[in-house]
Image (cartoon, rainbow, N blue to C red):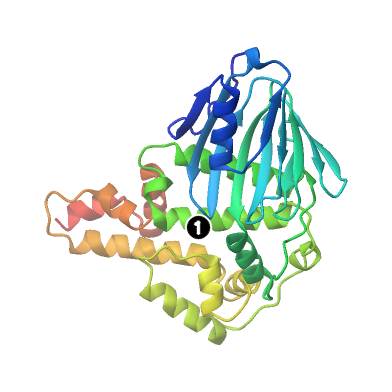
Amino acid sequence: MKQILQLLDKHPVMHTTDLDAAREAVTGVYLPNVMKTRDDKQLDVTLNAWGGHDLTVGYLTYQSETRLTMPAPEEFYHLNLTLAGGTEGFRADGKRAETSPGRTGLFLLPHLGTDLIWSQEAEQIILRFSRPAMENFAADMIGQPVEKPIDFDFGFDLSTGRGASLLASAQFLAAELNRPGGIAENPLVLEQLESFLMSNVLMAVPNNYSEGLLKPAPTVNLGRLKPVIEFIEANADEPLTPSELARVGLMSIRTLHASFQQTLGTGPMEYLRRVRMERVRAELLSNRDPDLRITDVATRWGFYHASRFAARYRQMYGELPSETLQRHA
């Protein structure tokens, strides 16, 4: 059967028709499993994946009806986003859920085993988050410790505004990780997108913290934001995240965002991008190197889309970066 999608094909892990090889590869990237297919002759497995311990982004298809029996992941959360076909899930606590393309997804919890039945046509983006990464981020979001696994719903809706945003952010991340010179090579941007993705997960997938997360966040005054602003100015060349900035300000991520919007009219990460743009302009203005490449300067400061960078630069300064460089050459 012809596959509809080939996400992350620049990061291949395996393409095989052998059941044992498929089982071993899925175990290596995600978690141990017992894998059975209805028709081994139709099996045509593709697994592409990027990542490491805190976040893994992968594309998986079996092209044969396949059942996987998996133990509790223990140290990981798994988010399954169906792009084609469908899956049916059975969790150790007795809950059952189904997925369909772009409409519903599944969430596997660290402390519960799961059985999944993939349809022959099923294709998925699968995100794996480490427990420390997800739970520390959640603690930073709500401003209180998270000491137990977050109780995400097993099945969840992707057709809502928040659900659609989650799916779109996962697809965008997969596409950018596949692009030469993209975010995989730019830590200033990658960590921000990882934080954005976890924020979308916490807001889109119902969980035991949803009620607090969906309430308006309390705000603080400019004096309380001053340490954060000073930290951004001093460390703009580092891969800063909302969690790190919130800890500097001794507040939750939600309070950080709400306070920046209320006091400065912009979000903390947008403020950071403005500071980085100022650093780019300063380099262009002070340049004495006739071989300087604008794209090299922009990429070093976290701007990896040349056309978007140029448009943003002109919006801020009334001229293109090339014009700045030419006038001060």
- Residue found 60% across the figure and 48% down from its top: 128
> Is residue 158 at least partly visible in the picture?
no
Percent from the top left, x then y, of residue 238? 38, 65
Mark 1: few, some, or many residues within 10 Å (few <14, many ≥20)?
some
Side (left or right) of 20 relative to 280:
right
Foreground: 227 or 135?
Answer: 135
Q: Quadrant of residue 213?
A: bottom right
Q: Is residue 120 above or below residue 166?
A: above
Side (left or right) of 327 relative to 226:
left
> Is residue 293 at least partly visible in the picture?
yes
Callout 1, which amino acid? Answer: Gln
Foreground: 65 or 193?
Answer: 65
Q: Quadrant of residue 302?
A: bottom left
Number of numbered tags placed on the structure image: 1
Q: Quarter holding the N terminus?
A: top right
Percent from the top left, x then y, of residue 170? 59, 43
Foreground: 12 or 313?
Answer: 12
Q: Which residue is the site of mark 1?
A: 192
Q: Quarter holding the C terminus?
A: bottom left
Percent from the top left, x then y, of residue 72? 71, 50
Q: Is residue 294 above or below residue 131?
A: above
Foreground: 326 or 59?
Answer: 59
Percent from the top left, x then y, of residue 244? 51, 71
- Residue found 54% across the figure and 51% down from its top: 55
